[in-house]
Amino acid sequence: MLEIRGIAKTFNPGTLNEVRALQGVDLTIQEGSFVVVIGTNGSGKSTLLNAVAGTFLVDTGAIRLAGTDVTRWPEHRRATLIGRVFQNPFSGTAPHMSIAENLSLAARRGRRRGLGWSLPRIFTDQLGEHVRRLSMGLEGRLDNAIGSLSGGQRQALTLLMATWLKPQLLLLDEHTAALDPKSADQVIRLSEEIVSRDRLTTLMVTHSMQQATSLGDRLIMMHRGRVLHDLQGSEKRRLRVDDLLARFEEVRRGELLDETAADMLKQTYV
Amino acid sequence: MTLLIGAWTIGLILSLLALGVFISFRIFDFPDITTEGSITLGATIAATLLVVGVSPAWATVAGFCGGAVAGATTGILHTKFKIHGLLSGILVMTALYSINLRIMGKSNVPLLSEVTLATRAEQLAASLLGGAANFNVFGWEVGVRDGAMFVFSLLFIALVGVLLYAFFRTNLGTAMRAAGDNAQMIKALGANVDHMIIGGLALANGLVALAGALLAQYQGFADVQMGIGMVVWGLASVIIGEALIGSPSLGLTIVGAVMGSILFRLLVAIALRAGLDPNDLKLITATFVFLALILPNLLASLKSNNARVTNA
């Protein structure tokens, strides 16, 4: 279970480039829940994921994961509880190392790394089976460097790596945004399969309205560093792409209203 | 022949330097100038300990440890205090100059009558050969001292190479390589990248200092100036090794770095024999590394230009 209490983050405070990326987010995600996060550009959805992953420490608020307060934990320590897939297919794998070696690194996520062999026989034997299940045709290429693979193949592997040891929380950060439609489809199907098989608590950011409506059991819409809508249960199940677009339109009009209201106030008072 | 054997031996000893540079430059992509100080540190520690009567093996181990501490210091400056990598190395290298002078108490220490690994190897070989001063290799007369040191260096470097290869195939070693390859990824898999860099630089500089310790015992002295230009020297060896091997596989790259070091030393010995002014050596080495660094890009752009011309 993930509990986020009033977290806020301002980048470059006190400068011209000040960005108030998160402005008090509260969110509780039950164990086994699959939450989809959408929002306009700059709404803070990726920042929310990064705050949970520990890419930076939040200014205020608290983050509890699996009953532990992780607010002050550095990124690598949180990785003992969290599996991650990044937007950029290059981020999640080591390009000059083999598929097998990359997976062996994932098999020790958050564990002590000592002087045991990274690729003992017993491990390489299970590898083929796991990689075959990705149906990316990689089971015969375990010794190839990851750098030779396509973006879709890399994301599928990163997904396998993030979930090799069952994480308390899986973070998917627009992990299909950089892929061609066919690979994106494959990776989404895999994500769904793995999440439901292992009943993983998942937080997924996406740009795709289609993914947002078809995946997950809860949908969060963010705007200006806050949670604007929170749809669960039957409300989420009934949600269609058109409904979402309508909500985005609402946000856009709200924004316009803000500006015209500000103009009006300016004319009257300044 | 003595000249050739000597070049081979120094090439072998300096291949430890090449392996150190390979770890910092290639595995961690960290331009580590500490190398210039730590090779001297290894030599001064070993020589000073030998003079006060410590056994050669322990003196050599102490040299390695000194280098490791120097490397770890650079790593800490870089990761914990957020100092630029190049500057961290420069700071430690500069500090080491004074430290080396402090350790020796003067600018060089000769090892004339001390028992060193070189004299140990010579004694062993002499007793094996039944006391002959020279022996025959494919028709060439080779002095026992030269031959013994050559064989000793060969075995020693082979052992270090195998250990290094094995280390980089362990969980810890694999994580270190990943930290150099994609830091973001290994962080997301729960490894502390700072610790990996500190440990990696400690290992790299330990090997470099080991080269210094062996070199001092082979040459018979330690000198505070002996580290100057050693980073470029090591880099040249690594680049030659990569050209010789042309394979990204870990084991072969290690073999390549050793071969590169030997070949480079042989080339230098031949050039010096042919009348090259030793004072020009560092200029030529730097030019060589410069060319080796820009050539791949230059060739690629020439190729694409040609392709464009033929297409048009």
Image (cartoon, coloured by chain):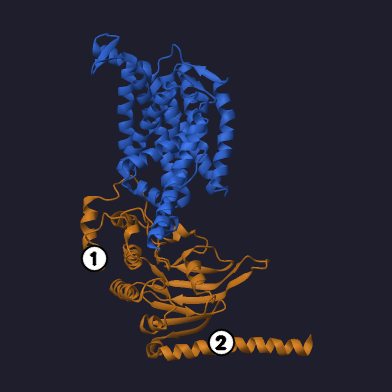
Residue A76 location (% of width, % of height): 45, 57
Q: What residue type is labelled 2?
A: Arg
> Going 41% across and 76% down the picture, which residue do you hit?
A30
Q: Which residue is drawn at 53% across and 25% down?
A: B279
**Along the viewing direction, whichever of B147 and A63 lies nearer the viewer:** B147
> Between B256 and A2, which is closer to the camera in this rendering?
B256
Of B142 and A104, nearer the camera is: B142
Seen in the picture, residue B177 relative to A244 is either above or below; the reply is above
Whole-percent x, y for residue A243 in the image: 44, 91
Q: Which of marks 1 and 2 is nearer the N terminus?
A: 1
Q: Chain B is drawn in which colour?
A: blue
Chain letter, orange: A
Q: How crowded is mark 2: few (under 14 residues within 10 Å), some or many (20 or more)?
A: few
| Residue A44 at x, y percent in the picture | 53, 74
Q: Mark 1 points at which residue?
A: A137
**Image height check: is B151 above or below B197?**
above
- Residue type at mark 1 is Gly
Say above or below: A268 vs B62.
below
Q: What element carries label 2?
A: helix
| Residue B199 visible in image | no
Q: Nearer the viewer, mark 1 or mark 2?
A: 1
